[in-house]
């Protein structure tokens, strides 16, 4: 089995029992040049927990709020301009371009700070009703207990109902000639499901997919290649 930059979740589902589900948290802010905490996104987890981004948005505030397009320490209304509201015009930023840096720097860490930026491209908001460019950001994230977070190259034994696996030295990629393997088992009468939080398999110089993630269940094998790269869009594997 060859893997690269990846973070995914395995959940053991026991009949008549609900799988463990984490409640997402939220942080928001607005573009500014001052020193306020509202100029930044600051996802916070308790000691012993790590951050995993669920989704990330840029947005424009309604013009009737009279929010400044650029907040300063002398001109900022954080309750109106820097806090998420239902009438914000938002668009999703995926794990590509600027979004890739933010997702990568925050997911799998214990501390993350993102300065809110203005987004000019891809803005689907009505310029008559919302500020332009988009000058606010919203991040939804999970706090995962660190003791459920384990490297695929770790030889230790884990017992529990939920496990988050990642490659060694994540978010750095695994070298093309590296191989890692681990095994997972569940009691008879139960099943195992896998959800990919982040998979980015690499291509070789010729443009062919050079890495694969192999999931074997008895005699059946599921081969995941570069077409499965998900740019932090959560996907069910099996």
Image (cartoon, rainbow, N blue to C red):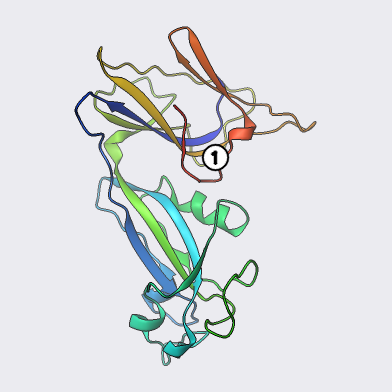
Of residues 194 and 182, the one nearer the viewer is 194
Report the quarter where the N terminus lies: top right
Q: In this view, does 201 lie to the left or right of 63?
A: right
Residue in the picture at 24% in, 52% down: 46
**Quadrant housing residue 22:** top left
At label 1, counting other C-alpha atoms closer than 10 Å, the crowd grade (few under 14, some 14-19, many 20 or more) is few
Residue in the picture at 58% in, 78% down: 126
Point out residue 57 in the picture as x, y percentages from the top left corner: 48, 63
Report the quarter where the C terminus lies: top left
Of residues 119 and 6, the one nearer the viewer is 119
Which residue appears farthest toward the right when viewing the image?
206
Point out residue 98 in the picture as x, y percentages from the top left corner: 59, 59
Point out residue 173 in the picture as x, y percentages from the top left corner: 57, 36
Residue 79's place in the image compared with 13, above or below, is below
Residue 62's place in the image compared with 14, above or below, is below
Residue that badge 1 annotates: 172
């Amino acid at each position: 089995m060859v893997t690269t930059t990846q973070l995914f979740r395995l959940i053991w589902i026991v009949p008549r029992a609900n799988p463990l589900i984490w409640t997402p948290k939220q942080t928001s802010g607005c573009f500014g040049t001052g020193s306020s905490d509202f100029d930044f996104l600051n996802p916070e987890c308790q000691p012993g927990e790590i951050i995993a981004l669920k989704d990330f948005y840029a947005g424009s505030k309604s013009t009737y709020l009279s929010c400044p397009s650029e907040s300063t320490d002398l001109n900022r209304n954080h309750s109106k301009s820097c806090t998420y509201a239902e009438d914000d015009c938002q668009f999703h930023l995926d794990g590509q371009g600027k979004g890739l840096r933010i997702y990568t720097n925050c997911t799998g860490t214990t501390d993350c700070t993102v300065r809110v930026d203005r987004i000019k491209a891809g803005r689907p908001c009505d310029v008559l009703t919302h500020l332009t460019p988009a000058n606010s950001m919203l991040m939804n994230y999970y706090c995962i207990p660190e003791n459920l977070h384990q490297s695929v190259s770790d030889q230790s034994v884990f017992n529990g109902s939920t496990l988050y696996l990642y490659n060694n030295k994540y978010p750095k990629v695994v070298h093309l000639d590296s191989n890692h393997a681990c095994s997972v088992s569940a009691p008879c009468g139960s099943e195992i499901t896998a959800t990919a939080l982040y998979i980015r398999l690499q291509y070789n110089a010729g443009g062919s997919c050079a890495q694969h993630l192999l999931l074997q269940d008895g005699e059946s094998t599921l081969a995941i290649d570069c077409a499965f790269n998900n740019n932090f869009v959560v996907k069910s594997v099996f």
